[in-house]
Image: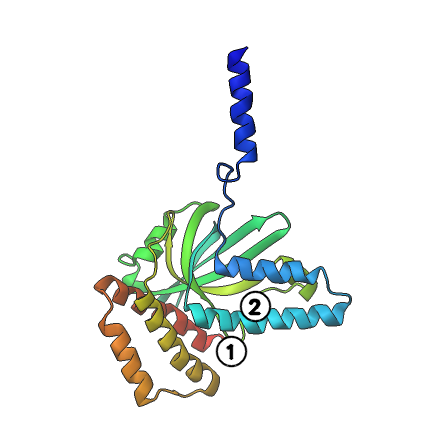
Amino acid sequence: MKKIILFLAVALLISCNPRLQQVKEEQNELVEYLLKYKDASFNTGNSIQRDELWQAREDSLVLLQDSLGVFHNLKGKIERIKANDIGKSKVLEFEIEIEPEQYFKIDLKCRYIIPQDSVKTDSLYNFIKSLSNYTTVYVDGAIAITSKLKPDNSSISDKDIQMSYPSYNFNVVSLSTSELPEISTNLRSAIVIWRKSFECILKNGKSGVTDDSIEAFKKATEILTPVEDKYLGKYINVCSLDLYRD
């Protein structure tokens, strides 16, 4: 009888003490951002309001990405892994599906291009090739953007469905089956500085680089570790694909 009473007392303590309850998994900034707009869409009274809310989501997504530089440790399942030979390149394609709650799913469509003579030594290609579909992965990267500096929305659904099932083309920088290392403030700063100049090229077809921005980027890269410098190089390489999306 005493054992039963003790068990009930412990169970009651756990259920009443919020510190001992299971903590809700912290969401990534991209997931939280898109969830916010999905929830807001329930309060729209007509299709005009919904369309305006959708446009606000798309416009502000670029600003969010510009401030962060990179979306870090997005957790999802990798699917539809395939590769094709195109000319002198191997084109790896896959999707990452993130489903933080029922009736809400983010689909990131990814493309990674490798020269044929680098296929055997490319670590990202060979790692993804080794995975099975539906493996849980963690990914760093950036939403692809167009020459009009809009997110490259890959969905063919109407805007109402897109609120609950957003889909974007995505540039993958790093991917793993375990959590990725944290991104330092120094590395984020270098990425953000580079993005500002890169978006000028996307929008205007020419560089908007100034002596000040060159100096700022130089100073930002000088304090990076070798690992961070390599990460920055990968980031620049994969995001440069946006130059050819339109």
Under mark 2, the amino acid is Asn
Q: What is the spatial separation of the Cα atoms under label 2 and label 1, in whole angstroms?
A: 12 Å
Residue at the right extreme? 46
The residue lying toward the viewer, choosing from 3 and 154, is 3
- Pointer 1 local density, CA inside 10 Å: few below 14, some 14–19, many at least 20: some
Q: Which mark is residue 201?
A: none
The residue shown at (35%, 68%) is: 188
Residue 97, position in %: x, y? Answer: 52, 53
Q: Is residue 179 above or below residue 9?
A: below
Q: Which mark is residue 149?
A: 1
Q: Which residue is mark 2?
A: 153
| Horizontal arrangement in the rendering, residue 158 relative to residue 100 (left or right) | right
Residue at the top extreme? 1
Res 139 quadrant in image: bottom left
Residue 127, position in %: x, y? Answer: 34, 51
Under mark 1, the amino acid is Leu
Label 2 secondary element = loop
Residue 158, position in %: x, y? Answer: 68, 65
The residue lying toward the viewer, choosing from 58 and 207, is 58
> Would residue 192 be seen by someone viewing this image from the given angle?
yes
The residue shown at (54%, 15%) is: 4
- The N terminus lies in quadrant: top right
